[in-house]
Every structure is written in structure tokens, then in C-alpha cells.
Amino acid sequence: MRSGPNAADGRKQGWLEGWRLGACRRIEEDTPQAAVQRRPWRVMYVPQGFDAIDEGVEAALAETVHLIVAPQAEMLAYALLHRPDAMLVMNGLHTFPADQKEQVEGIRRLGIKTAIWFVDDPYVSGDSAEIAPSYDYVFTHERSCVPRYGELGCAQVHHLPLAAHQGLFKPMPVTDEYRTDICFIGVAFWNRVQLFDSIADYLKDKKVLIAGSHWDRMSHYGQLSKFVRSGWIEVPETVKYYNGAKIVINMHRTTEPLSDNKNTRHWEGHSINPRTFEIASCGTLQLTDLRPELPEYYRVGQEMASFGNPGELVEMIDYYLRNEEERLRVAARGYKRTRSEHTFIGRVARLLDTIGLGAPATQPAGEGTPLG
């Protein structure tokens, strides 16, 4: 039988992990998903190719309407074949065909309502501004971009925040290889590089994961390279790392049109990224930089914590690593908020109500109403 400090530490960590999973299980039992209102409509969905969002939207649509999933290059052909009532395009950027606008215009001529949901705003404003006027309805997760699309002549523009696909992002037990003190998963945009360079000395004796591309940009890469896992991490692996971390850092991209951005129109960024919902949906403590919209969705300091500079981040990491039970309580409250209010079922219901597919649904608590 093991004894001594290591065994005591193991027992403590086991108790803490049991408390986390038990609390999340109780929250799941106490906050069942809202009843789904089925609509007798046919909706064609065109995915962007990013599973974390696409699978959540597809699952919500499949529970709500008759769903048709169409390849990006064959939108018009699928519309001609299936004659849906409406088409929803996710993002319409990066991998979409060059004739996207022509295909969308052909679909509109068939009398089919067309909608696009931009989820990369404002970082690719040069591209999104080009295609937005082709659609009947424009939805954007970035509230500050609503008037910008209006200025481009888009008649129907609505703010629709993202959510967590809770079939993917959920609390779960993980094995030791996924356990860290501090975790960050994402591309090494320059503002993120500067953050981790500035706290490199603090991190060097912690158990850390920094995953994603371009992290060799760091000035202190040699000091932190042992923590870096380069390249893309699949969503199921990401979920395991979130569950295994004591603290997950979330930092939004900068909006300046530097080499990492195509924000050529200099649109502002006020809204929170999908990672905010996804981390919280795993029942793990999140430390995030503060976007203006964050307090509308989570109680800062109660359901997650925010930092304004590297010094504050270090202080918060130190505090929550020392006060583990408080860390777990904050994470559990964030999980409860996400499970009850930030679901793709709720977001999709708002979208369908806005484009007029069926009678207005009862809004789940906290989902709010669409903003024009």
C-alpha cells in the first residue's frame, strides 16, 4: 500500500476529481435540456468543416426540422434536388467555392430563403463583407458587426452568439497523460505569443500544455518547448485535455489587421469566442481575457475568471492552484450556466424564428431575443 506525500497527493487529487465529476453529474440531472419544438420545415445546412460547431448545429437542426446536409461546392445542385424551405450556410469562408455568390443567387431565385451565420467575425471582414449581401439573412456571433453589415446593404442582420455542443464538450474522467495544471489550445496569434512569453519564467516549473500551430514564434520557445504540442488537435482530444486541466486559459485574437488577420475593414471585437462556451461546458475552470460581452453570459468571478494583463493572470493561476475547492466550485457554476443557457438547440430556435420558419418558440431562459 502506498504511503507518504505522493500517496497523500494522489488521494487528494482523486477526491477533487470525484467532487468535480459528481457535481457536474448532479447539475446535468438538475438541468435537463429544454423541450424541442419540432417544425415541419426542410432546412438545408452547408457546413464549414469545423466539427466543434458544425456537429452542434447539425444535431440541433436534426432535432428541430427535417435536415439536409449539402456539400459546399454543390449548394445549388442540392437545392434543385431537395427544394428546402431554407438554407443555412455556416461561415461561408476559407474552404467555400469561388462561385459561392452565384450559387446563392440561384438558390434565392428558387424562392428558398438563404441565411449565413458568420462565426469568424471580425477577423476576416474583407471576405465576409464581400459575400454577406448575397444572403437574405445575415447572422453574426460578433455584436459589433451588426451595424457594419447593415451599412453594406444587408436588410436582415442579427446577432446570434455561439454555444457549446454539449454532446462533444462535456465533463468526463481522463487518464493521467491529459492532466495538467495549465492548458492552452489554439493558434499562436501574436498577442497570445506575447502573453506566454511574458509568463514563461512562471510556467517553467508547472505542468503545462500549449498546443496548436506557430508556437515556435515565442522568444522563450526554448524555455517552454517541452510543453508545446505542435499542430492540430482533434476535438475529442481537446475535450480530454480540457477535462484534465486544473485551469484552461482562453485568450481572444487581436482584431488588428496584422499578418494573422484579414480584418481589413478594422471592425471591432466585443463578443466572446466559441472556446468560452466549450471550456465551461467541460466543467473546468477558465481564465479568460475580458471581452465587453462576457458579463452578459457569465458572472465574472463566480462562473469563470478574467484577467487584464499577464501579472493578473499569474496571480489568478497562483490563487486557484492553491484554493482548489474554490476552483472547482467556480467551474461547476460555469458548467451549470452553459448547460442551461448556452446550447445550440436554443440558438437554432432563435435563428429559425427570425427567418420565419414556424411559430415563434418559447425562448429558453437566458437566451434573449435576436437583435437587429
Image (cartoon, helix red, strand yellow):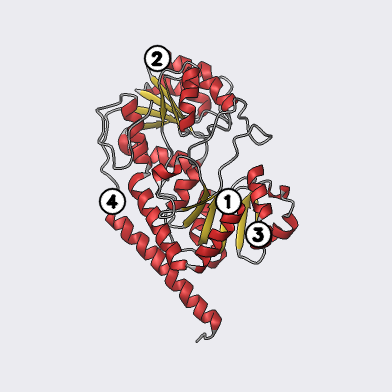
Of badges 2 and 3, nearer the viewer stands 3
- Quadrant that contains the C terminus: top left
Q: Are marks 2 and 3 in contact (CB under 8 Å)?
A: no
Which one is earlier in the sequence, the residue at label 2 or at label 1?
Answer: 2
CB atoms of marks 2 and 1 within 8 Å: no
Most foreground residue, 131 or 89: 131
* Looking at the image, residue 219 lies above or below residue 274: below
Image position, residue 99 (x, y; %): 56, 19
Q: Identity of the amino acid at label 4?
A: Pro
Location of mark 2 (residue): 110
Q: Label 1 belongs to which residue? A: 185
Query: SS at mark 3?
Result: helix
Q: Is residue 21 left or right of residue 257?
A: left
Q: Amino acid at mark 1?
A: Ile
Dot 3 or dot 1, earlier in sequence: 1
Residue 291 position (above or below residue 350): below
* Label 3 to label 4: alpha-carbon separation: 38 Å
Residue that numbered label 3 is attached to: 227
Q: Disc 4 on helix, strand or loop? A: loop
Crowdedness of circle 4 by 10 Å Cα count: few (<14), some, many (20+)? few
Q: Is residue 353 above or below residue 338?
A: above
C-alpha span from label 2 to label 1: 43 Å
**Badge 1, how many Cα within 10 Å: few under 14, some, many 20+?**
many
Q: How much space separates mark 3 and mark 1, taking CA atoms?
A: 11 Å
Q: Which label sits on residue 32?
A: 4
Q: CA distance from mark 2 to mark 3?
A: 54 Å
